[in-house]
């Protein structure tokens, strides 16, 4: 499994993804699931993936090499997308292409072909946007009312974001909350693991502000995890005991 989160606030975009994949308890590996497509000053697009690793890797390769346009036959690459909406459409087409080619064979082998993508970024001349693309190729977009999207094992990290993230949350605060959400998931789900990959993009900058891999010995992430655990213990101890006895 995996856990990826995208947060799109007024200040900009945060995307975080873990790197653990497993095909059984004794077959655990590390693979990058967050990729960046960027032309500084023109566009910056981040893609995070969850689900069948072979399908998601093949979709990324199609997006890098390009898909034939259904009318002109010219290859369309993600890096050339003229808008974020067109980029989301292209990701959907890539998923549909792989499903058409491999779906029947995977079904005969009883292999799940489910994949989900987070696609966030900004193209010059338009606003920053964040989409979730489903296995059928359709997609949704987050908005100011709920400015984050999650894929993979999201249930452990969602309550933190539900209680804390608003559209007015600052970019650095959004990154901190995203890391707390990731830490909570790491604590509760063995299918999600370090290292983490992250990227932040400030709205209008059209270039990444931060790209980083958070390793197991990262001092900030360790401190964040310890402080969050201590804060939770202090919070529940400060609440009065139930009057039900």
Image: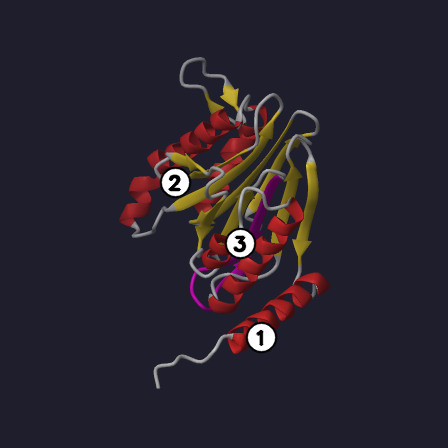
Would you name the residue on which mark 1 appears? 234
Question: Where in the figure is residue 163, as x and y percent of width and height?
Answer: 49, 55
Residue 128 highlighted magenta (yes or no) = no
167 left or right, relative to 132: right
Q: Which residue is mark 3?
A: 164
**In the displayed image of the protein, which residue is found farthest to the bottom?**
245
Q: Where does the image place residue 44, in percent across and percent down from the top left?
A: 62, 32
- Count numbered badges in the picture: 3
Mark 1 Cα-neighbour bin, 10 Å: few <14, some 14–19, many ≥20: few
Of mark 1 and mark 3, the one earlier in the sequence is: 3
Q: Identify residue for label 2.
A: 134
Task: Name the residue at 42% across, 44% down.
Answer: 116
Whole-Å distance between the Cαs marked 3 and 2?
26 Å
* For the residues bearing labels 3 and 2, Cβ distance under 8 angstroms: no
Q: In what quadrant of the picture does the C terminus appear? A: bottom left
- Cα distance in 3D space between marks 1 and 2: 40 Å
> Which of the marked residues, 3 or 2, is nearer the chain's N terminus?
2
Magenta highlight range: 12-31
Q: Is residue 152 left or right of residue 84?
A: left
- In the shown orientation, is residue 152 left or right of residue 100? right
Image vertical order of residue 113 relative to residue 207, above or below: below
The x, y position of residue 20, in whole percent, is 53, 58
Residue 119 vs 26, above or below: the answer is above
What is the secondary structure assignment of the residue under circle 3? helix
């Amino acid at each position: 499994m995996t856990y990826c989160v995208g947060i799109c606030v007024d200040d900009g975009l945060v995307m975080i993804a873990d790197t653990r994949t497993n095909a059984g308890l004794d077959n655990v590996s590390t693979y990058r699931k967050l990729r960046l497509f960027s032309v500084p000053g023109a566009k910056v697009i981040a893609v995070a993936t969850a689900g069948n690793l072979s399908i998601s890797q093949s979709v990324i390769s199609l997006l890098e090499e390009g898909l034939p346009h259904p009318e002109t036959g010219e290859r369309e690459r993600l890096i050339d997308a003229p808008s974020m909406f067109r980029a989301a459409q292209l990701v959907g087409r890539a998923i549909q292409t792989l499903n058409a080619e491999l779906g029947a064979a995977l079904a005969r082998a009883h292999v799940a072909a489910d994949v989900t993508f987070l696609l966030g970024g900004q193209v010059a001349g338009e606003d920053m946007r964040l989409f979730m693309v489903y296995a059928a190729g359709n997609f949704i977009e987050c908005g100011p009312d709920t400015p984050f999207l999650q894929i993979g094992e999201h249930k452990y990290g969602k309550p933190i974001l539900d209680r804390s993230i608003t559209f007015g949350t600052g970019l650095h605060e959004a990154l901190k909350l995203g890391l707390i959400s990731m830490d909570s998931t790491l604590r509760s789900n063995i299918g999600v693991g370090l290292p983490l990959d992250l990227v932040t993009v400030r709205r209008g900058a059209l270039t990444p502000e931060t790209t980083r891999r958070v390793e197991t010995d990262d001092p900030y992430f360790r401190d964040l995890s310890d402080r969050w655990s201590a804060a939770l213990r202090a919070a529940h101890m400060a609440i009065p005991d139930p009057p039900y006895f």
